[in-house]
Structure formats: C-alpha cells, structure tokens
Image: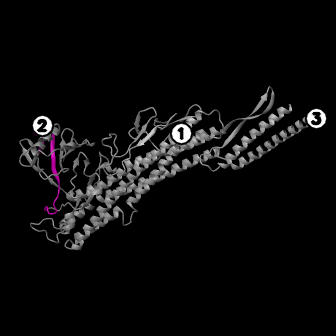
Amino acid sequence: MSLSQALSAALSGLQATQSGLSIVASNVANAQTPGYIRKSATQVATTLGDTGIGVQVTAVNRALDTFVQSQLQTETSGGAYADLRAQLYDQLQTVYGTPGSSNTLETVFNNFTSAVQALSTSPDQSSARTAVVSAAQSLTQQLNGMTSDIQGMRSDAEQGLSQAVSQANSAMQQIAAINQQLASTSGSNATTATLLDQRDSYISQLSQLMDVKVVPTDNNQVNVFTNSGVQLVGAQASTLSFDAKGTLSTTSQWSADPNQRSVGTITLAGPNGGSIDLIANKAIRSGQIAAYLEMRDQVLPQAQAQLDQIAAAMSSALSDTTTAGTAVSSGAQSGFDVDIGNLSAGNTVQIGYTENATGKQKSVTIVRVDDPKALPLPASSDPNNKVIGIDFSAGTASVAAQLNAALGATGLQFSNTTGTTLRVLDDGAANKIDVSSVSATATATSLTSGSAQLPLFTDGSIPYTGAITAAGAQSAGLAGRITVNSALVADPSRLVVYQTSPLTASGDTTRPNFIYNQLTSASLAYSPSGGIGTAASPYNGTLTSYLQQVISQQSDAASAADNLKQGQDIVVNSLQQRLNDSSGVNVDTEMSNLLSLQTAYSANARVMTTVTDLLNQLLQMAT
C-alpha cells in the first residue's frame, strides 16, 4: 500500500469514527428524551480493485422494533380513552356525592320522606308542615344543582373536544410537513433519522387523541388513517373542524341533521376537497376524542335522564289521579264510559282488552297531545302495549273519530255519547275482543281539589303533566326546573287541608299519609331513557328502589371505568417498556462503544502521524 493510500485510509477512518462519536454523543444526550430511538452507523469498506483503501459511513440507522411501535400506537389510543373516561366518571361520582354523606340525593330524599312521616303523626303542627316544605325545597335544589353540574361537565367535554381537534390538526400538519421533508432527502443519514423521530412523536400525540393506523410508503413517508379507514395524512394533511356550541343545556343534543343538532360535530375536510362528518360515520373509535364524545352524548345525557325520571315520577306520583271508567253496554257490545274533560296535555286514557282468539292481554295508552307537530308519537316497542297520541283540540267527538281511524282494526269502537264522555266498546257479536278496563289519569292542579292528590312539585311555575311537544317531552330536563309549588310555600297548611268546603280538619292525616305512601311504597313505571329497564320491559318500583338503582349503576360504571383504565395502563406500560428495551439508549453500552471509537480514532490518528513523518523524511531526502 502506498503512503497516499495509507493516508486516505486513515483519513476515512477518522471521518467514520467522528460520525460514530457524534452518534454516541447524541444517544447519551437523549437517553431520557421520550420517543428518542437509539441510532447506530453502518460502515462499509471502500476498495480499489481488490485492495481495501478505507471505510465509509453509508447510513445512520434507528434501532426500532416497528411491530412493537405499531402495537404501542394502537394501545396508546385505548389508554388515553380509558384514562380520560375514568377521570370523567370520577367527576360524575362527585356529583352524586359520597354515600351516606349529608349532601347526596339519597340522603336529601330520605330527609324529605322522614319529614312527611313526621307530618303524618302530627298533621296539626305548623312546624311539621314547614319542615316538609323545607325538606322538599332542599330536594328540588339538590336535583337542580346536580343538573347544573352534569350540564357543566357536558360543556367541559365540548370545550375538551374543541381543544383536542386543534391539537390533532397541529399534529397532522407536522406529520405532513415531515413527510415532505423526507421526500427530498436521500438515504438514511442523521437528518433523516432525526426527522423520523420527530414524526413518530407527532404520530404518538395524534394516537392519544384518536385511533390511528400508520401505513409506510416510499421515501420513508407514511400515510395515516383512522382504524375506520378515513385518511388523516398523506402527502398533505386533512383538516378537522369543530363547531363548538359553548355552554350546553339539557336540550343540547347531537343529531346527524344539522337543523336539529345543538352540540358541536367534527368534520374532516380532505386536501383535495370533500368532507365527512366523523361523528355521524362513527369514524373515531378510541382516544381522548372518543371519550369526550361518549361522555357528552351518551353517559351524561343518560345520567340527566335518570334525574329527570326521578323528578317526573315524584311529581306524577303525588299529582296524578286515576279514575276508572263506568261499565256500560249497547246491544251485544259492552265496555266503559270515561270522562276525559279534565285531562291536560300529556295525561292519558288506559284501555285493557283481551284478544279472544289468542287469549293475549293487550293494552292501549291514549296520550293527549296539544301540539300537532309532535304527532304521530313514536311507536311502542312492546307489541302488547300500543301508545297513540291524539289531538284533543276539536272536542271529544273528534277524539272518538281519530281513535276509530287509528284503532278500528283492533275491534275497539269509540263514540262520544254526551259532553266530554268517551265510550269504549268491544266488537259485540264478532267477539274478536273483550274490553276489560278503561281508566283516565289526570293531573291535579289545585291544592284543594277535594282529593289527597296535589301538585306539590311543579315545572317552574306550571304544573307537570307529562306533556309532549315537537320540542320533546316535558320530562326532559325537568330535574333542572323542578320546584316546590309556590302556593304551597306560601301556605304549608295545604299539606293537610285538601278541601275548603267542608274544611278539612287540621289533624286530618289523609293527605300526609297519601304523600308518604306514594313516596315510599307506590310502584311506579320509569322510562328506559335512563338506562334502567328496557322499552319492552320498563323498570317498575318505588322511588327509593329506583334511586338506589341509579346510584348503584353509576357506582358500577365508575368502577368498571377505573378497572379498564388500570388494565389499559398495564398494557401501555408493558409495550412502552418493550420498546424502550429494544430501541432505547443504554448508557453503559454507549460508553463501551465510545471507548472502542476512541481506540479506533487513536489508531487512525497514529497512522496519519506516521505517514506524515514518512512524507516529511522523503521531502528532506529529496532536498
């Protein structure tokens, strides 16, 4: 080997060693940097013919296990979803309070029933009457406050979605920008490795917000999709938009129809035009965004529906008066007469009948609906219990005509015999059906109606009758509006006095006993909108039992959310440790590499020094 070849070989060795030292220094400096992948250099001998004349660094490689990285990205989405969901459930638990404490709904309800029980033993004591009113006000305030807290959580989720969408856009834009930079680089050099690390970091940020799938393409670029197949990033980034609505209320609901939607939705606009509603298409299935959506649109509305059911059942249980129809016959037909003149919007007529061919017991619930835009009512999922809404505005004869048109096929026949009396008959000689019962349920709106029923609770300043309008059922959001009847607050004696002529005796226990029994013993039906019971089999039970069901369900849901979080945390931490073990920096190993590089550097430097000395000697000899 000539001196010039030796000098060239030593110089290339020094250059390769310097590259290696730079990589080791970078590895050690970033040993604790999250997301940093250990780097190493690939060295290849250079030759001239069959003679080696040096060494060259051809690539800077990342020690990356792509399979573990892909798993970690998937589980990161699940972990972020589970963590945020558990956090939000913990917040919801604070709304319900610690069981047994003085500020829980169950405790406040029990205080109310205890005050009513005390009134039933001392109805003539003004202090007992005042105590009932005070306890009732505490109960309504508790329901009002819980509603405010739940809607506050929904508003926070709306704000969280807005921030998450902004963060997702930033991450997607950075991924696209790095894709473009990588497209203009060649080979695997230090710059490329650094860009890949940066892109992985942004993909990790994006995976915390939503579920992602990363597909590698040419020139170290990647395409990023949701697991549902919607492309987020390619050569360019798509753009997410969120039309936040700010403060939400009990009437704020998501809908695929923009005219009915009153909460924000997430729209993705592609770089080449076109857009898609990610919520309507169920495109986001995990990550923080999915957790926010689930809480805003499902969990919290269901919690609100449970409170509304308690408020509605409590109000109706004390104010609803059911009157049985009077048995009548007309030739071969038989049935009942029932007065519907005192029904308010939302009040009902119940009909029970038997299909003689099958022996099945069936029922019809007729609902007074004063808003024609709300008709027809949604069909009942129970084939044996038909619910039909009827417009009462044109009088009883019109009601009968509407019912004949709607229910004539069943064999039921309706007529208006006189005044506000509705007659319900079977089909007589045809003997397809037999009518077994007819009754009407009306809301007592007066404190001195002559019966034990009373409108103790009202919907703001109006009676609660269960009315249904195009805007929805009156029960929706009732827990936030329920209050104690202002007339009762002004005159608590009406808790005992239920008629003025003749005047109810001050020691009469009729009304106090009725209130107590309805609150503690009456079996009531609850809408499945609260997640307890089903449409085909609604939950029936006392107010106390339903309240306990609500508390138990919320506690179980919070516990399940925490268990999911703990399990997901274990998975994510395990995968992160596996990635760290295979791709992270081991300082001891790097120090060993450093010693080897220092030795190589010294050897190459010695060769250069020797060659330099020899060249100097040759020059001296030549002169």
Q: Amino acid at mark 2?
A: Ala
Residue 291 on image: x %, y %: 44, 48
The residue labelled by disc 1 is 175
Q: Contact (CB < 8 A) between labels 3 and 1?
A: no
User: Sequence order check: which comes first, mark 3 or mark 1?
Assistant: 1
User: Sequence order check: which comes first, mark 1 or mark 2?
Assistant: 1
Q: Amino acid at mark 1?
A: Ile
Q: Secondary structure at mark 3?
A: helix
The residue labelled by disc 3 is 621
Q: Amino acid at mark 3?
A: Met
User: From the viewer's perspective, is the residue at label 1 or at label 2 nearer?
Assistant: 1
Residue 319 on image: x %, y %: 20, 58
Observer-nearest residue: 281 or 15? 15
User: Sequence order check: which comes first, mark 2 or mark 3?
Assistant: 2
User: Which residue is at 20% across, 45% downward?
Assistant: 363
* 211 in the magenta segment: no
User: From the viewer's perspective, is the residue at label 3 or at label 1 nearer?
Assistant: 3
Q: Contact (CB < 8 A) between labels 2 and 3?
A: no
The residue labelled by disc 2 is 430
* Cα distance in 3D space between marks 3 and 1: 63 Å
* 437 in the magenta segment: yes
Residue 284: assigned label: none
Q: Looking at the rendering, in which quadrant would you find the C terminus?
A: top right
Numbered marks: total:
3
Task: Say if residue 575 shows up in the picture.
Answer: yes
Q: Is residue 12 above or below residue 361?
A: above
Residue 90 on image: x %, y %: 44, 56
For the record, the magenta segment spans 424-450
* Cα distance in 3D space between marks 1 and 2: 76 Å
Mark 2 crowdedness (10 Å alpha carbons): few <14, some 14-19, many ≥20? few
